[in-house]
Image (cartoon, rainbow, N blue to C red):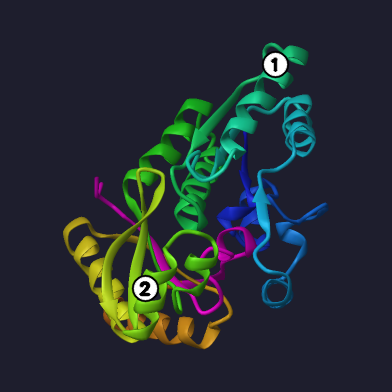
């Protein structure tokens, strides 16, 4: 049993190796110049954005996904694919197309495609729980259910440094971005029903981080805590500071992970967030 995900889960290589998780990469492009997300680090990427503007992003190629799926099936394994929200990318649709292609060659292959309805470590937690179930010898259906279950018990909250990148990417109007920056209004963003939405607006990033932390505490006070990851884009010191605050309150292990270019191009450097899941369903 193998679990396949995409690069916007931002799982570390260490975790992927430990749990035998396969991955396909999304791409970023400037005109005809395309590169895989996993082949460019954030420092280089944001320097490119500063000089060249915002690139486009695209799902993994059919060829890349076909090779990964076919390799698993031809080794005799069943496959559970868990991809970022279908409202954010065509990756899920590509997965369904490739599944049909693989089944044309191997009609008895067992493949499931799961829409995580999110990205980053909210997607990542679904992948990790599925991979743990796979390692425990669970069936394909049970592995799929492990992923779907964690989606109901997880949340991803994140905060941009300012509204410039949301403006550049067309996610917020120019006037709104200008006024927001002027009055230091920062949105706390989340992912619900497969789409990025604004949970609340707060004055100053510092207050937004505190409000994000309080929202997490409310969730875990009512539903109990599973695991926590802090996401950031080029603001490691802030991420470490937030991790220390969480550890002081909860006495838990807090991992820190980068957000890569495909998701990061919408919020920009300085963004910080928390992904976590609870032991009881939040939805």
| Residue ranking furthest to the front | 175
Name the secondary structure under disc 1: helix
Q: Quadrant of the N terminus?
A: top right
First in sequence: mark 2 or mark 1?
1
Name the secondary structure under disc 2: loop
Camera-side residue of 241 and 197:
197
Camera-side residue of 118 and 185:
185
Q: For label 1, count other residues whose C-alpha is less than 10 Å away and answer few (under 14), some (14-19) or many (20+).
A: some
Image quarter of residue 241:
bottom left
Image quarter of residue 247:
bottom left
Vertical arrangement, residue 168 with respect to residue 161, above or below:
above
Camera-side residue of 229 and 162:
162
Horizontal side of residue 119 vs 224, given as left or right: right
Residue 248 place in picture, x, y as percent: 31, 84
- At 46% from the left edge and 79% from the top edge, which residue is drawn? 161
Camera-side residue of 61 and 246:
61
| Residue on which the image places disc 2 | 252
> Could you tell me if residue 251 is visible in this image?
no
Horizontal side of residue 163 vs 66, given as left or right: left
Q: Is residue 275 magenta?
A: yes
Q: Quadrant of the C terminus?
A: top left
Q: Which residues are magenta?
A: 255-283
How many dots with numbers?
A: 2
Residue 99 place in picture, x, y as percent: 66, 24
| Residue on which the image places disc 1 | 103
- At 77% from the left edge and 62% from the top edge, which residue is drawn? 39
């Amino acid at each position: 049993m193998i679990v396949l995900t995409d690069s916007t889960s931002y799982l570390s290589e260490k975790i992927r190796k430990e749990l035998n998780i396969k991955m396909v990469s999304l791409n970023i492009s400037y005109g005809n110049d395309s590169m895989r997300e996993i082949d460019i680090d954030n420092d280089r990427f944001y320097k490119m954005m500063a000089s060249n503007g915002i690139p486009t992003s695209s799902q993994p190629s059919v060829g890349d996904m076909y090779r990964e799926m076919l390799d698993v099936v031809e080794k005799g394994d069943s496959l559970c694919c868990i991809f970022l929200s279908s409202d954010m990318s065509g990756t899920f649709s590509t997965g369904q197309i490739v599944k049909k292609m693989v089944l044309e060659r191997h009609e008895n292959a067992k493949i499931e495609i799961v829409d995580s309805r999110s990205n980053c470590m909210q997607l990542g937690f679904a992948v990790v729980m599925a991979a743990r179930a796979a390692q425990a010898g669970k069936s394909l259906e049970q592995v799929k259910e492990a992923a779907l279950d964690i989606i109901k018990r997880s949340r991803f909250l994140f905060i941009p440094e300012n509204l410039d990148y949301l403006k550049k990417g067309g996610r917020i109007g120019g006037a709104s971005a200008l006024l927001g920056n002027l009055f230091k209004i920062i949105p706390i963003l989340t992912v619900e029903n497969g789409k990025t939405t604004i949970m609340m607006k707060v004055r100053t990033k510092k207050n937004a981080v505190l409000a994000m932390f309080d929202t997490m505490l409310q969730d875990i006070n009512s539903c109990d805590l599973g695991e926590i990851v802090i996401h950031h884009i080029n603001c490691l010191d802030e991420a470490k500071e937030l991790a220390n605050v969480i550890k002081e309150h909860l006495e838990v292990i807090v991992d820190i992970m980068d957000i890569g270019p495909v998701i990061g191009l919408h919020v920009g450097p300085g963004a910080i967030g928390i992904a976590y899941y609870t032991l009881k369903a939040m939805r």
